[in-house]
Image (cartoon, grey):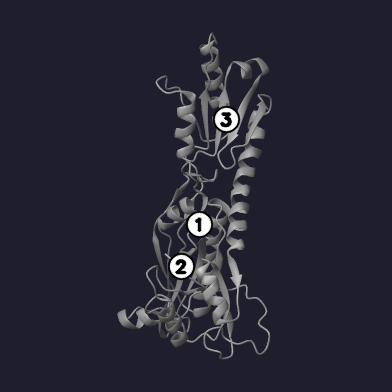
Amino acid sequence: MASIKILYNCRSREFLWQEGHTAFATKTEADAEVLEILELYRRIYEEYLAIPVVKGKKSELEKFAGGLYTTSVEAFIPNTGRGIQGATSHCLGQNFAKMFEINFENEKGERAMVWQNSWAYSTRTMGVMVMVHGDDKGLVLPPKVASIQIIVIPVPYKDADMQAIFDACSATVNTLNEAGFRIEADFRDNYSPGWKYSHWEMKGVPLRIEIGPKDLVNSQVRAVRRDNSAKVDIPMVNLAEQIKEMLANIQQSLFDAAKQKRDACIKIIKTWDEFMEALSQKKMILAPWCDEEEVEKDVKARTKGEIGAAKTLCSPFDQPELPEGTLCFASGKAAKKWTYWGRSY
């Protein structure tokens, strides 16, 4: 009764910004799809956008209104100290089926109500990517999703054979294009190489290739990474293989750097005073909680200010050990789970 829509088209490299609504005969089937979609979200964030996320369940106060429960992948922006809901996968239960009389005939020939799910992935993802990876020079795009992975720039020198340099640039573009890379050359003659460097850095192109007279003599190109500005001279021999390895390294390095920054912002606390201190430090806070809606409302009220109140982000599926006798940081009651808290977008 259900079909899963493609969330990322690897061939066209396009994200499909569609909301999915699916229906099932049983809750077991619905539950399975909720987690299947959530894993697709994690893969897009972590494997394509190089952004670490936490998979978890939303609180009753934060879940989708009218739904049975909501799961999400949660990202964090270290520069601002705010969490952001990456994407959600909801189990709507049978509430809407009752309301709109969405029925079917089951295997026993009986009339039954469907179990429904709803899930969505939006353009906020682009904002998360910009905020996590961007720097003072502009965008920083992971190679897997960059529309242009490599830009080739000719570097003129006095008395240099510019036609030979242009030919080498064109040959490099053709070679790497045939190898499957998304690559272009900037042959504009009304801008200096330095201006072009800045222009393409601002656009976030992962790798820049420079070719000048010395590179022609040495049968090489100079490759400059966008993520860390590292420069390396690469021989023309086996260029495609070396560029492939470099782009893969950039992709992994972006994820590792983002995860390191995110993890450095995670603060584990057990008391209200520790919570308030961590909140003032713009941390992503992991705290023991009694899982009561009124307590969450109270935390929001007590932390409300000009920059917003703290709230639950999610209760991670990967739960740390909760020792017997652990108390809720906010109410002093017996804690039932660990939950991430913080200010969020």
Badge 1 crowding class, 10 Å Cα cut-off, few under 14, some 14 to 19, many 20 or more, is few
Quadrant occupied by the C terminus: bottom left
Which amino acid does the dot numbered 1 rest on? Asn
Vertical side of 324 occupied by 68: above or below: above
Q: Nearer the viewer, residue 195 or 58?
A: 195
Quadrant occupied by the N terminus: bottom left
To which quarter of the image does residue 230 belong?
Answer: top right
Residue 88 is tagged as: 2
Q: CA distance from mark 2 to mark 1?
A: 23 Å
The residue labelled by disc 1 is 79
Q: CA distance from mark 3 to mark 1?
A: 36 Å
Residue at 50% over, 63% down:
81
To which quarter of the image does residue 328 belong?
Answer: bottom right
Q: Nearer the viewer, residue 307 or 237?
A: 307
- Is 89 placed left or right of 257 in the picture? left
Residue at 49% over, 69% down:
72
Task: Provide the secondary structure element on which disc 2 rests.
Answer: strand
Which amino acid does the dot numbered 2 rest on? Thr
Residue 176 is tagged as: 3
Task: Provide the secondary structure element on which disc 3 rests.
Answer: helix
Whether residue 32 is visible here, answered yes or no, is: no
- Is 265 placed left or right of 68 in the picture? right
Badge 2 crowding class, 10 Å Cα cut-off, few under 14, some 14 to 19, many 20 or more, is many
Q: CA distance from mark 2 to mark 3?
A: 38 Å
- Is 150 placed left or right of 245 in the picture? left
Q: Nearer the viewer, residue 218 or 40?
A: 218
Which amino acid does the dot numbered 3 rest on? Leu
